[in-house]
Amino acid sequence: MRFDKPEDFYTVYDRHRTYVRALVRKKHLAEFGRNLWRPGDFAPGQRVLELGCGVGLFLAYLQRMGAGEIVGVEMDAKARDYMPPEVAACVHTTTFEEFLNGYRGPAFDRIVLLDVFEHFSPGEGVALLERLKAILTDDGRIVLRVPNLASPWGLQFQY
């Protein structure tokens, strides 16, 4: 199947995807703490941007951990229906390109891409990282989780 625009992918994806409400459970507290919060040197009060935030589970986790301002970007408008209202209020339903082109706010302490970066070609990935560096604080970090081995075969934290 051919798509004229990347966002057209969701016309087919929507027929096959299942959505789960973003409820932070005990297992998420442990998993995100062990695999993201501590290794990413997150701290309460930090400004965090998540690109490709899905239903906002990690953003909800960040709120629970006392992060400062959180901002999410998600192209899939239907995902918004599964976000907690306080998370949905912080999420832009648009492309990364449109968000970055229009962003004029303060720099972020952390920028997060979970199971997203592997969808870019090497050239696109380098270009994206260069753009993200421009909106990162001097001591900020970009936190990536790749590849998405959670689907369909597991082992998502092996790499």
Image: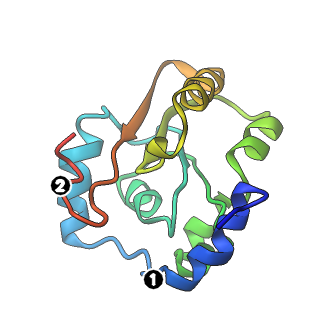
Q: Which of the 4 image quadrants contains residue 153?
A: bottom left
Residue position marked by numbered label 1 in the rendering? 18
Q: Secondary structure at mark 1?
A: loop
Rendering coords of residue 155 (x, y %): 17, 54
Neighbour tally class for label 2: few under 14, some 14-19, many 20 plus, Cα within 10 Å? few
Q: Amino acid at mark 2?
A: Leu
Residue displayed at 80% across by 36% down: 101
On screen, residue 149 versus residue 111, left or right, reads left
Task: Assign the N terminus to one quadrant of the image.
Answer: bottom right
Residue displayed at 24% across by 34% down: 39
Residue displayed at 79% across by 33% down: 104
Which sits earlier in the primary sequence, circle 1 or circle 2? 1
Figure check: 14 above or below 106? below
Figure check: 2 above or below 134? below
Q: How is the image coloured?
A: rainbow
Rendering coords of residue 124 (x, y %): 61, 31
Considering every residue shown, the one lying at the far top of the view is 138
Q: Is residue 78 visible?
A: no
Neighbour tally class for label 1: few under 14, some 14-19, many 20 plus, Cα within 10 Å? few
Rendering coords of residue 148 (x, y %): 34, 53
In 3D space, how far apart are the residues under numbered discs 1 and 2 (Cα atoms)? Answer: 20 Å
On screen, residue 117 versus residue 35, left or right, reads right
Q: Secondary structure at mark 2?
A: loop
Figure check: 136 above or below 95? above
Rendering coords of residue 68 (x, y %): 51, 45
Figure check: 48 above or below 2? above
Q: Is residue 144 visible?
A: yes
Residue displayed at 47% across by 58% down: 59
Q: Amino acid at mark 1?
A: Thr
Q: Which of the 4 image quadrants contains residue 8?
A: bottom right
Residue position marked by numbered label 2 in the rendering? 155
Task: Assign the C terminus to one quadrant of the image.
Answer: top left
